[in-house]
Image (cartoon, rainbow, N blue to C red):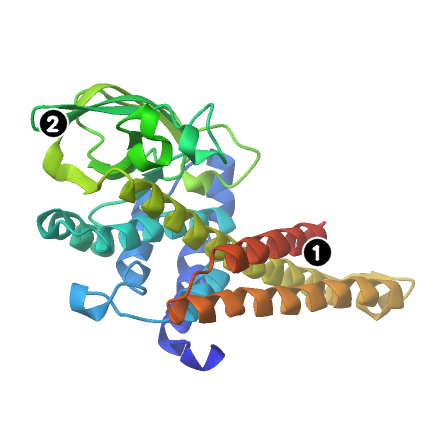
Amino acid sequence: PLGRIDDGFVEKARLFADEHLKPHAERWEQNRQQPEETLRMAISQFAGIRIPTALGGSGESAATIARVYEELARVDIGFTCALAVHNNVTIAASLIENTSLRNRTLSKLMSGNAIGAFLLTEPDAGSDATSIQTLAAEKNDTYIIDGSKAWVTNGVHADLLFVFAQTDPELSAKGIAGFVVKPDLPGVSTKPAYNLLGNHAMGVNEMEFSNCAVDADWMAFAPGEGFKAAMYGIDVGRFGVAAMCNGTLEGGLNSAVAYAKKRETFGRQIIKHQGLQWQLAEAATQLEASRMVTYRVAEIIDRGENFTVPAAHAKKFATRAAFEGLS
């Protein structure tokens, strides 16, 4: 899969990280803010990478977007996560069979005119997505949405919400549908950003829906298909998390090595102490292994095969490697 990487996009991501993220990332974190304009700028450059050329995108490989995420997360994983979630929404928009709705959303999501958010998780429903409580009751040519969504990445600045709701609780997963909702509709309440331990550039919050009327032609995925679309989005998200963790571990290693070359104890650079060399080498080996697991997922994606299990393995391995390597 490495031969299919578009180096042009990788270089653009490297320059973007150094020019637009590195000088500001610490300030964004200290101010607990999501950099909306910088996010829109990144969207305009990178959101179309995985979208087919027939729909106006670049049609590049999954390995290419993984490398882009690595370069960006090398500097700021929170910002990169915001972009990745938006990109997942963009991919979802490209899969909408309703041509009119797809045309109303996809170009805006690729250009940065719209920031997208993926609303599946709820305060009382996380990993068990079939138990979501948000309801979408059909009434004439509209659906009335009521419920709450939690951990909404990009929620504070989103222009288009991809909301998954239950149309018939008796049908479980087969009743779940997906809707595109504008946050300025009556009945949509955008809550303040969460006070997190870090990564405030993600712009994470809660959103509530109370008697929110959505026209039926804004249904992106019909009941039953909505759950499949949501699970596909989760799989894509896991792959993205693995790539981002690889990038942030690389960034941490680079910083550690640079510091170890400058810092001296007992008359020698600390990087020349064997004990530290072992620790750095172990983290580097874990990074190499994590990348190989991640790029295996990319290869499976590009072959058009099911990647649910490989993506789960990659996310599990990469998050552990990053956490232990940066500890």
Name the residue located 48 percent from the left edge and 46 percent from the top edge.
78
Name the residue located 39 percent from the left edge and 62 percent from the top edge.
16
Q: Which residue is mark 2?
A: 142
Label 1, residues with CA under 10 Å away: few <14, some 14-19, many ≥20: many
Label 1: which secondary element: helix
Q: Which residue is mark 1?
A: 325
Label 2: which secondary element: strand
Q: Is residue 188 above or below residue 267?
A: above
Q: Name which of mark 2 and mark 1 comes first in the sequence.
A: 2
Name the residue located 41 percent from the left edge and 79 percent from the top edge.
4
Asked if disc 2 and disc 1 are in contact, CB closer than 8 Å, the reply is: no
Which kind of residue does numbered mark 1 sit on? Gly
Which kind of residue does numbered mark 2 sit on? Thr
Residue 184 sits in which quadrant? top left
- Residue 314 at x, y percent in the picture: 57, 58
Q: Is residue 63 visible to the viewer in this orientation of the structure?
A: yes
Name the residue located 36 percent from the left edge and 76 percent from the top edge.
8
- Residue 168 at x, y percent in the picture: 28, 26
Residue 210 is left or right of residue 14, and the answer is left
- Residue 32 at x, y percent in the picture: 46, 34
Q: Is residue 167 above or below residue 6?
A: above
